Image: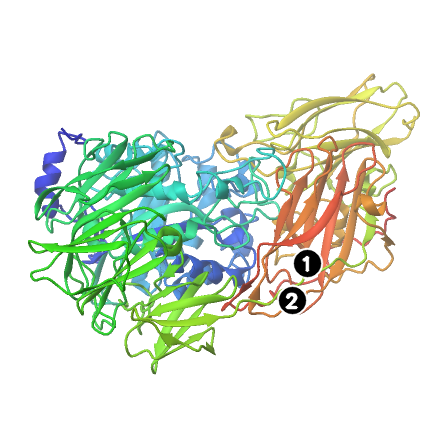
Amino acid sequence: MRFLPSLLLLPAVLTQAHLARRNSTGLTTAVEWDTHSLSILGQRVFVLSGEVHPWRQPNPDLWLDVFQKLKANGFVAVSFYTHWALHFPTPTAGNGQGDWQEGTYRDVQRFIDDAKAAGLWLIARPGPYINGETTGGGFPGWVGNIAGSLRTDNANYTQAWKPYLTSVAKIIAANQITEGGPIILVQAENEFSAGTGRSDYMQNVIDTLRAAGIVVPITFNDQHGGAAGNFSPDKGGEGAVDIYCGDSYPSGQVQTVYYSNHLAAAPSDPLCLAEFGGGFLQGWGATSRGGTGYEVFETSSRNNQYEDVFYKDAYAQTATIFNVYSSVALTSYKLNLSIDAVTVIFGGTNWGQSAEPTVYSSYDYGAGINENRVLTAKMPEMRLQGLFLRVSRDLLSSSLLGNGTNYTTSAAIHTAELRNLDTGTAFYALRQDRTTSKSLVTTKLNVTTSAGALQVPVSTNITINGIASKFLVTDYTFGASSATILYTTIECASLIPIFAKNTNPGFLHPRIMTWATIGGRDFLVVYAPSGENGETAFKFSTEPTISTFGAANINATFANGILTLSYFSISGAQYIDIGDVLTVVILDKATAYGWHAPIIAADGLFGNYFSIGTNETVLVSGPYLVRNAKISGGILALNGDLNGTTTIDVFAPSSVTALTWNGAPLSARASAHHSLVATVEGAAVVELPTFGRWKVIGSLPEVNANFDDSSFVTASLITTNYTNLPPLAGTHVLYSQQYDFYGGNLIFRGHFNATGNETGFGLTVQGGFGFGYSAFLNGRFLGSNQGNASVSLTTDVWSIPNGTLLVGKDNVLTVIQDHMGIVETSTNGGKEPRGIRGYQILGSDTTFTSWKIQGNQGGATNAPDTFRGYINEGGLYAERIGAHLPGFDDSDWSEGSPLAVDGGGLRGAGINFYRTTFDWNIPSNIDVPLRLNIGPSEISQNYRVQIYLNGWQLGKYINNLGPQTAFVLPSGILKRRSTNTLALSLWSLDDTPVGLMGLSFISDGAFSTGYDMADYTLPPGYRAQGRPTVAVEAST
């Protein structure tokens, strides 16, 4: 007997599925949802969403590039956080309204506009707390300074978050779908538990969103696959949202709990997974040094195989997700959406001081689009899934009838059966029962169809080879011809051939898309791994004519109104014509990965949104990327990217007689299978840039006893609101957050009058996982704590070398500390200081007369570079004087290289700062994603490097930890039309010579592109205002 999940609830699902009550926010009738999926005025659409964080791509000119790549690869929505800390560096930023500066990574309006231009819906996640492996989990550094706990109804915390959430909510409200914008859902808070002092805080967050004008559904993302039901509308109480969601990051064996969690926690909602693993995190020292450390996710079973199995299993558990809504004032139709949000699909970079301590500079995440905007193998897999999901309307109101190992003739195969109880269409998801298995299993599947119970395939077997899955259909009606697939044992890449223009896209047949034809013909694309067999059966009232174009590995039989096509040893692309109405395209999976289905946008407010504004599309095989397509005057204009010379095969309406690619006409010929074929040349070979001459300056003058620190902040505080982690020794509080310094290297200078009896210092320093620090007395190196990937706080004793003390005079203990970011609230409630937790002088009763502290120039309040923002710089001398910025005058610096092979680097403990320039004049229609690669030294060498390109701090390298050695240089920040300035800080934590073993540019490939790779010219160069001008000789 089949295993039926939730036996007590299932009968109600079976008998009442078509009678499920629709819900709405009560603020509009435009948006409704039921137990299956979401509705916007009546139309169901599967919304496949990917996570993108605006600030992690510091060049906003590249946001649209990422959005177009998502749209082209099957996604229809983007989920995004907004980052409180970036918009409110101080509580009064922007006169209490925040910093949303146009043209910067803080330009949330542009992010929204670019998403709409690409035809993507948006799911806004403003927090206030976001987590996201970013500094403070999105909390500004000053928030930890308030008295009391965070993420509660603490009045001090409420006073802190209200201005931010009100400001961002107004931006969101103005861009809701009801206002013509792309925002369809808004999430309140994130991964949070109900309880005393918390539920009323959550309600306050919701009320603030509503008060700002948000009328779309408010959602919540709960941890652990949505098992707890925190703030579920079905559980009620303070903080209950409209739609409850869970998140999950499974690996190894799939988690089969989502459906049962859903029924227990929020049965009145559609099953929503607001975060589902799109990759996995790596921390400091997580793997061997090389690349970004995330390359393992492109070569292991957590690559596209992971998506193939884990995502389809989630769909098989009825995951459909969030409600989106449009306004009656804007359109006269309804749509019904369900969403599967994947985190993250583009990770980007933790540049500057934007990371929290468990992660490093790269936030590649093993995502479908890598940190350098290059598509990995995950993206064509998502394209196949997305193309299927966007047209499979019956899936969005299907019920889970059962699952288990009894559906197939092999007990090694697990099957889930979903069925639309109104139309009879069914979906069968097959995978290995043990999803870590790499065995090859052949089997047959028992299905229930309109023709009765069948065991399929008839002529061969279904193959599940290792970590793989198949999502099969029965009684699936599609196309203008209303052809019906009785069953198929290979997957459908696209049940949407080419749509002809639909002048009324909102009114779609409830069972299928409004199919149309290419010259009177539907196209069906199916695929399977190379060498496998397959079988597809169609229902026809009379026997149609069949043409297999002479293929010997395809058999066709007709009996009792059923046409059965059998395919053997599938390879490449093959075509079968069925009468004058249908062409079946059979592809091996590798070939299917090269097929695209760009839409043809229509006029109107949402003309670039599939099924909402248009149903017209074309099929294109061959290119690396098809960004968009347009038909005008018999010409199909394609825009996209190529990774080499490519033959493209285009299936378009018969009115199309000519092709262009990125504006250039192509010489196209007609094929025998109803397409136009042309060859497009790829990009020419591009030489990588070369470094100019290096110049050097010392960047730790603060170790000298006579350094003038009068401009530094005096550490005068003797109390702290970090009552959970109070100072351990000493009279004054040396916590950097309390002095307006929230990231980057920190410098502490403690002054004391020596008696001569002092023998050493005891220091307890807290900097976050992987941090390090060095201590100096009167310019003499005492020692360093070199850092450990699992240590956030360290206590050390440093002895005073003979002859170092200045008896009867002012002595200075200097501590240079790395800052790894502020913790998220999962650690110490988010209240964990950075700086010196305790200090004492050993050997005498001498005490420090004063302490000075310095971080980034001007702190968060008065940072001189307001464009890049306070998180871009730390407290190094070279940063404070602006030496990392283009245009800084280094004419009086010495020549010197950071490379050991050139005799460069440091002779002992300390910090040097290096600058060079280079040019790279390549065309704007070629995309060459570039990285700076550091050749690692012996792992016993303890040094740290920070990388700056044209003023942007883009990476931090720690030689003794790793893993990252290759750092993305974002296009646009990396300029083509003007000279680039590259700078490096080199900090040796040992009193031994240190130099880089290697430094080079490497690329992720060369792509001819339809995207304008323009220079990002808005960021300013060096300005003297607000910066010191002290000159210092190079360290030795």
Q: CA distance from mark 1 to mark 2?
A: 12 Å
Left or right of 972? Residue 548 is left
Q: Residue at x 87, y 25 (%)?
A: 754
Counting from the top left corner in percent of width and height, residue 479 is at 19, 63
**443 w.r.t. 890: above or below:** above
Of all residues shown, which one is farthest toward the top?
A: 843
Give the SS element for disc 1: loop
Helix, strand or loop at label 2? It is loop
Q: Splitting the image into 4 quarters, where does residue 772 fall? A: top right
117 relative position to 319: left or right: right
> Is residue 817 visible from the viewing direction of this image?
yes
Q: From this viewpoint, is residue 241 visible?
A: no
Amino acid tagged 2: Arg
Q: Type of residue at label 1? A: Asn
**Horizontal and vertical percent for residue 703?**
82, 37
Residue at the (65%, 22%) spot, across then down:
728
Q: Which residue is mark 1?
A: 950
N-terminal-most mark, 1 or 2: 1
Neighbour tally class for label 1: few under 14, some 14-19, many 20 plus, Cα within 10 Å: many
Discs 1/2, front: 2
**Residue 556 falls in which quadrant of the image?**
bottom left
Camera-side residue: 510 or 813? 510
Q: Position of residue 884 (x, y in %)?
A: 72, 54
Mark number for residue 976? Answer: 2
Q: Give the vertical position of 661 relative to 361 (above or below).
A: below
Q: Name the quarter where the C terminus is drawn.
A: top right
Q: Going by the image, does 6 lie left or right of 433?
A: left
490 and 26: which one is in front?
490
Local crowd size for mark 2, using a 10 Å CA cut-off: few (<14), some (14–19), many (≥20): some
Residue 947's x, y, as percent? 68, 49
Q: Residue at x 13, y 39 (%)?
A: 13
Q: Is residue 210 above or below residue 237?
A: below
